[in-house]
Amino acid sequence: MDAQPFASEDGGTTDLILRAVAFAAHKHRDQRRKDKEASPYINHPIELAHVLWDEGGVRDPLVIAAALLHDTLEDTETSWQELRGAFGEEIADIVLEVTDTQWLKKEVRKRLQVAKARHSSERARLVKLADKICNVRDLGTRAPANWSVERKRQYFEWAKEVVDRLRGTHAELERRFDEVYALKP
């Protein structure tokens, strides 16, 4: 990612967001979603940014960049130091806050996510809200082929536990989550 930033009238917001998209696309380039179409993974972080910007009216460029980068620490060979070098400490810290500790068992990671939600920074809570909205929507339209109805229901319930601890962060995004949660199988 050695591209030179370009001048923009928005104080660098466009440059930051485009650099984050390019970085995430590069890091996730060989990854696919678990849906039957095996969609490119990069669609997921882009959808988070879309939910935050278009549905939530979130204009904080650090939140949008962190949303685009939110799975790089968890799902790619990216380090916090690399993110900090490319995007600064604030964005790297937001991404770290929403990153699961991969060496823990799945159930422990899920419980930890619920426990940490309320104590996260506001920026991390916004990214987490968008992630849960996108994941629950995807389960309704593009669920992994091998997921049973029961597994989908369990995910919906767990996502709601996380979101319930994020309440008071952003009323519109919380309302959007409630709308998709109402479609629980």
Image (tube, helix red, strand yellow):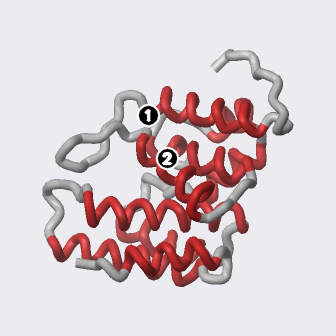
Q: Position of residue 140 (x, y in %)?
A: 27, 66
Q: Quadrant of residue 153?
A: bottom left
- Quarter that holds the C terminus: bottom left
Who's the residue at 49% across and 47% down the image? 45
Few, some or many residues within 10 Å of mark 1 (<14, 14–19, 20+): many
The answer to whether residue 152 is above or below residue 49 is below
Who's the residue at 41% across and 43% down the image? 43
Q: Nearer the viewer, residue 112 or 145?
A: 145
First in sequence, mark 1 or 2: give its number.
1
- Is the residue under label 2 in contact with that under label 1 (CB below 8 Å)? yes
The answer to whether residue 56 is above or below residue 18 is below
Residue 164 relative to residue 5: left or right: left
- Under circle 1, the secondary element is loop
Residue 103 relative to residue 183: left or right: right
User: Of the numbered discs in the image, which one, if any, rests on residue 56?
Assistant: none
Who's the residue at 43% across and 53% down the image? 103
Residue 90 relative to residue 146: left or right: right
Distance of label 1 from label 2 (alpha carbons): 10 Å
Amino acid type of the residue that numbered disc 1 sits on in the rendered structure: His
Q: Return the residue at label 1.
A: 28
- Quarter that holds the N terminus: top right
Few, some or many residues within 10 Å of mark 2 (<14, 14–19, 20+): many
Q: Return the residue at label 2.
A: 45
Amino acid type of the residue that numbered disc 2 sits on in the rendered structure: Pro
Q: Position of residue 65 (x, y in %)?
A: 65, 44
